[in-house]
Image: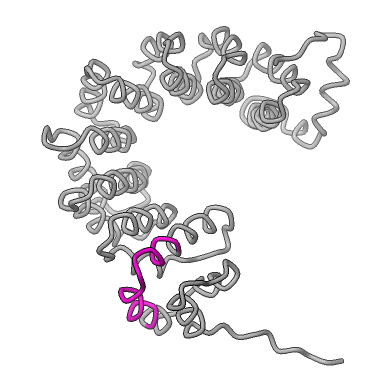
Amino acid sequence: MVFVEPMKRSIRDVLDQLRSGFVSRARLYDLSGLDRAEAMEVEAAWRDLPVRTRREVILTLVEVAENDFEADFGAVFRIALDDPDATVREAAVEGLWEDEDVRLVPRFAAFLREDPAPNVRAAAAASLGRFLLLGELGKIRPLPHQQAYEALLAACRSLQETLEVRRRALEALAYSGEEEVAALISEAYRHPEEKMRVSAVFAMGRSADERWAEYVLRELLSPNPEMRFEAARACGELGLEEAVATLIELVEDVDPEVREAAIWALGQIGGDEARSTLKRCLRSDNEALREAARDALRELEFLHGDLGTLLIPFDFFDEDDEEEEEEGFL
């Protein structure tokens, strides 16, 4: 038997290719799981790469990391946090979206307070929300939790801050149960800019506070599809049974994202009407709608039903319900 030694990665080879202006996606996998010495080698070369190359690399790594949970480009993303280019810094923050290292909190808080680029500040606000949630769940120490909260609160209240950054700060703050956050959500819902009102409805759902039920139910009928989308999601997050009838209507909404949000919400809320509607969606001619319905049914059975049904193929439901109602959705 012949043993073939696996090819060893060479960070130097990757960097040489990057300097040449071309590197394959497969070769970029060599940047996963860097040890300290390798990370230092990449850091020494990073700033000398053309900005176009740095952007292409970091955006590709973010995309790969989203689709491959085994890829670990955290060392590269941390290097890119210091990049002079705002697009690279923003992508680096987003690339660390699953990283729960609390040492990132003061870094992201500084970005939110001081970075000159609003897109970087907005990304930092969104990422701080993750640490706020961890703090609310008691999974991190009080200090980083408080640092995240105070930075987000200051950004949300700042009249000098851009609307986009204030929106992202509000959405992140919604993880907190503090009354001053509820007051900010209420204020945002009355804001003259509809984008801020959309974020308020998003925050209502994320808060898991049923005090907002009246508002999210009302916005299911909004003429703005973005608002209907967020309202449907919020109804699902709040588990509002009184929303089921309207959500069933939204399964036939003209906007495809609203349709899928309504389907997701029905899976979260559960009940016989929701289950029946989702089963009918399995017979839709729309592949995306069918897939959304499958996922929602699995979630419904997991949250509200017999876990044994999770093992049953979903075409079983089609046959079982043929006599119930012949027509499907869309």
Drawn side of residue 164 relative to residue 307, left or right: left
Q: Position of residue 255 (x, y in %)?
A: 54, 20
Against 267, is 142 above or below? below
Give the residue at the far bottom of this rendering: 2
Is residue 53 located in the magenta-colored stretch of the structure? Answer: yes
Q: Position of residue 155 (x, y in %)?
A: 18, 39
Q: Main secondary structure of the magenta part?
A: helix
The residue depicted at 35 percent of the width and 16 percent of the height is 212
Query: What colour scheme does the image use?
Result: one colour
Q: Quadrant of the C terminus?
A: top right
Q: Position of residue 62 (x, y in %)?
A: 47, 57
The residue depicted at 78 percent of the width and 10 percent of the height is 327
Drawn side of residue 125 relative to residue 316, left or right: left
Span highlighted in magenta in the image:
41-56
Q: Position of residue 29 (x, y in %)?
A: 55, 70
Q: Quadrant of the N terminus?
A: bottom right
Against 297, is 88 above or below? below
Q: Quadrant of residue 74?
A: bottom left
Drawn side of residue 298 relative to residue 149, left or right: right
